[in-house]
Image (spheres, rainbow, N blue to C red):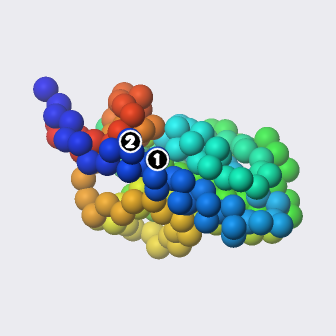
Amino acid sequence: MPQFIPLISEAKICEKIKQIGQKISLDYNDKDLVLIGILKGSIIFLSDLTRQITIDHEIDLIGASSYKGTSSIGKINLYKKPVLNLSGRDVLLVEDIVDTGRTLSKLVEFVTSLHPKSLKICTLIDKHERREVEIDVDYSCFLLEKGFIVGYGLDYNEKYRNLPAIYDLKL
Ligand code: IMP
Ligand code: MG
């Protein structure tokens, strides 16, 4: 039976997202902000983050997958492109967790080809252990050295996204 070891509480997540939302609101004041959530892991984070941002902004989604189980399969599949025209706009990519950095480096390359005015990265979790590609994370809620976590949008084989807090998964 898998074990779920509590790691980050609902209250901690909520408090941190409030702070990051305030910071983004200040940094993007007078800018043309578009949040782009990376499917599917970021949807719960995105839905809380957007409500903590007090300036006008738009939302879109991009679909990228790389994972089966707890280890990367190496290739990234870009299965859904954003609908909005991003040219000349201030794009903030919203990710659940940066692990090897491959997904984001591929997405940064793709979004850059759409000619945004600026492109930054916001992640709920910045996990360091397996980083392969250098990624400049502009906003990060929590740092994690290692482990495989689930809940609050993060899955293991598509399950456990619905857990309201974040847990270390021990299989
Ligand atoms: P990367 O391309 O290796 O940086 O992988 C990023 C993607 O892997 C994230 O968007 C997650 O979907 C998934 N991922 C990486 N680590 C974890 C984890 O600890 N729990 C759940 N998903 C993870
Ligand atoms: Mg995932």
Residue at x 82% of width, y 60% of height? 32
The structure residue drawn at horizontal position 47% and vertical position 73%, both measured from the top left corner, is 134
Does residue 107 appear anywhere in the picture?
Answer: no
Find disc 1 in the rendering and name its residue: 14
Q: Secondary structure at mark 1?
A: helix
Identified by mark 1, the residue type is Cys
Label 1 to label 2: alpha-carbon separation: 6 Å
Crowd around label 1: few <14 · some 14–19 · many ≥20 (10 Å): some
Find residue 91 and report its image quarter: bottom right
- Give the residue at mark 2: 10
96 over 44 or under it: above or below: below
Q: How crowded is the residue under tag 2: few (<14 C-alpha within 10 Å), some, or many (20+)?
A: few
Q: Residue at x 60, y 56 (%)?
A: 21
Above/below status of 63 relative to 54: above
- Residue 86 occupies quadrant: bottom right
Which percent across, then down, holds residue 158? 40, 30
Nearest the viewer among 70 and 24 is 24
Q: Residue at x 52, y 44 (%)?
A: 45
Q: Position of residue 96 (x, y in %)?
A: 48, 49
Q: Nearer the viewer, residue 4 or 13?
A: 13
